[in-house]
Amino acid sequence: MNDLSGLGSAGVTALVVLIFAAILIYLMVKSVPQGENWTVERFGRYTRTLHPGLRFLIPIMDKVGARINMMETVLDIAGQEVITKDNAMVSADAVAFYQVIDASSAAYEVRDLTRALSNLTMTNIRSVIGSMDLDESLSNRDMINSRLLHVIDTASNPWGVKVTRVEIKDLAPPPDINEAMARQMKAERTKRADILQAEGLKQSAILKAEGEREAQIREAEGRKEAAFLDAEARERQAEAEAKATQMVSEAISKGDIQAINYFVAQKYTEALRDIASAPNSKTVMIPLEASGLLGSISGIADIAKATAGATGTKGKV
């Protein structure tokens, strides 16, 4: 009986030891999952941070303080009414992205990190949009996002948090302002259409005027060219008449009386031509000395023969 009771006591003791050892191992060995950091407190005071993997603690003395998620987290910012610089009411909501980079600061520098970031973001949304006019706030979301990111990231830096992005999801003016903006947009588009139409008419008028100007220039150049050719023709005619006068003068100086008849016959025939071609003349009765005219013509023929003979003689020589 004593042996049995001794064996029973030993078994109980061994069982207690095993249970105590299991509890000790459970308290001493910790497996930190990927994406998390755990803080370690010794008698309530922070001592170190456990990174992902298998880690060991001193039982009874050490315990896990806070389990901090180190992955980037999305934070929805609740919508709120914001008054702009020109006293217009708009409804604004946003979304923020942040990541804990220091687990100890996130655990011990701020209580309820998510709520703190949310309130900080809402406060700065009111500040940033409140410093802008309605039109400016609606058309400059990128600038609002940049300012919010800078302010919130700087303010949350002591908490061991890196704010990576802040985006305004919606800016909604009241219905009456929306209606006024729609009328303004319609008026602006009508104005642009009128301006484009006026520009088209202006361009058309300019092109038409340039075309007329080009036509006038070409017409003037044509008249100039015609006048130049006409002057050149008159110049050549004058040269021919001068040459003929010279030849007649030379014939007269040699005693050839028929040369005078050449000029008389030429003027006589020109006068008859002018009288006959007058638009108001019907019938012309002029005393005509046919023998004189024929004599003049024969004189012209004799001059021509003499000129031709002199030319032949020069050629033979």
Image: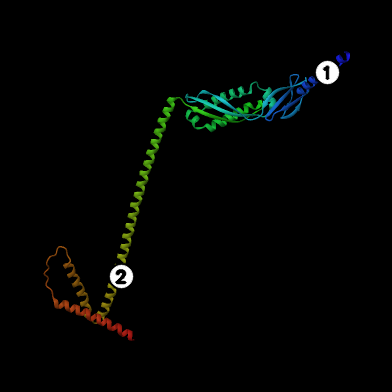
- Can residue 254 be seen here? The reply is no
SS for callout 2: helix
What residue lies at 18% left-to-right and 69% top-to-bottom?
Answer: 273
Q: Which residue is mark 2?
A: 236
For the residue carrying disc 1, how many other residues have a C-alpha within 10 Å: few (<14), some (14-19), or many (20+)? few
Q: Is residue 29 left or right of residue 317?
A: right
Task: Please name the amino acid that badge 1 sits on.
Answer: Gly
Above or below — where is 41 with respect to 267?
A: above
What residue lies at 41% left-to-right and 27% top-to-bottom?
Answer: 179
Q: Quadrant of the C terminus?
A: bottom left
What residue lies at 21% left-to-right and 73% top-to-bottom?
Answer: 266
Q: Which residue is mark 1?
A: 11
- Can residue 229 be seen here? The reply is yes
Query: Residue 257, position in %: x, y?
Result: 21, 80
- Whole-Å distance between the Cαs marked 2 and 1? 150 Å
Q: Is residue 19 left or right of residue 101?
A: right
Q: Nearer the viewer, residue 150 or 86?
A: 150
For the residue carrying disc 2, how many other residues have a C-alpha within 10 Å: few (<14), some (14-19), or many (20+)? few
Q: Quadrant of the N terminus?
A: top right
* Eye-nearest disc, 2 or 1: 1
